Image (tube, grey):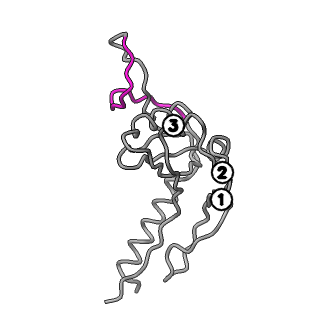
Amino acid sequence: MKSPTIWLAIIILVFASSSCAPDSKKNQVLLGKEDSTSSKSTESINHQQIEEVTMPQNLISAEIEPLPNKGKQAALELQRLGFKILRVGKTISVQAPRSLWESTFNVSFKEEKKTVIAEIEAQKTYSRAVTDNLVIPEKLESSISEVMFIEPPEFFQVQP
C-alpha cells in the first residue's frame, strides 16, 4: 500500500488539475475605480472595489518584484493592462492569459512536462516561460524590477 504522503500528493495533484480545467467561471479582479458612493477616485486597492469579470482559465502565474515603495502603483498599472492581481506584498502575485504575457512583456512560452511525484511517475504539462527577450514595458519601468514565472511543484516522499 502506498504511504499517506503519496496519497496526499495525488489528491493535491488531482485537485490542482481539476481547478485549472477550462470553463466559464467568473474570476474576481481588483479595480482601482471610482467609488460609487462618492465622486472622488481612489488609487488604493481595497476589497470593496472587486468587480467580477470573465477570464479564460488557461492562466499563467508569476511573481512581480516591485521597486521599493512601488507595490501598489505597480499592481494598479498591471491591473489596468488586464492582469489579475492575486496578492500584493513584497512581491505581486499575478495571473494572465498567455497572450497578454506575450504582448506585454515580449515573453514566449514552451510546453514542457515535469515529474511532480517521482514515486508514481506523475507528470504535469505546463507552459515554461522563455524570458531571454523579456522586456518590462515603459509604463511599468518605474515600478517593476523583475518578473518571475511559477513552475509546478515537485512532491517527494520523506523517508523515515
| Residue at numbered disc 1 | 130
Circle 1 packing at 10 Å, graded few (<14), some (14-19), many (20+), is few
> Residue 22 in the image: x percent, y percent?
59, 48
Q: Is residue 60 above or below residue 29?
A: below
Which label's residue is closer to the chain start, 1 or 2? 2
Q: Reading the chain from its start, which is encountered first: label 1 or label 3?
A: 3
Identify the residue at image location x=50%, y=34%.
Answer: 79
**Residue kind at label 1, given as amino acid type:** Val
Q: Quadrant of the C terminus?
A: bottom left
Residue 49 part of the magenta segment: yes
Find residue 78 and name its label: 3
Q: How many angstroms separate mark 2 from mark 3 (CA)? A: 16 Å
How far apart marks 1 and 2 lie (CA) works out to 6 Å
Above/below status of 35 relative to 26: above
Amino acid type at circle 2 is Val
Task: Indicate the quadrant containing the N terminus: top left, top right, bottom left or bottom right.
Answer: bottom left
What residue is pinned by disc 2? 107
Is 71 colored magenta in this rendering?
no
Residue type, label 3: Leu
Position of residue 97 in the picture relative to residue 91 (left or right): right
Question: Mark 3 or mark 2, which is nearer the start of the sequence?
Answer: 3
- Return the x and y of residue 71 as percentages of the image width and height: 40, 40
> Which residue corresponds to the image point at 48% horizontal and 48% vertical from the top-left?
64
Q: Which residues are magenta?
A: 40-54
The reply, left or right, for residue 141 in relation to residue 36 is right
Circles 1 and 2 in contact, beta carbons < 8 Å? yes
Q: What is the x, y in percent for residue 66?
A: 44, 45
Foreground pick, 113 / 110: 110
Q: CA distance from mark 1 to mark 3?
A: 20 Å
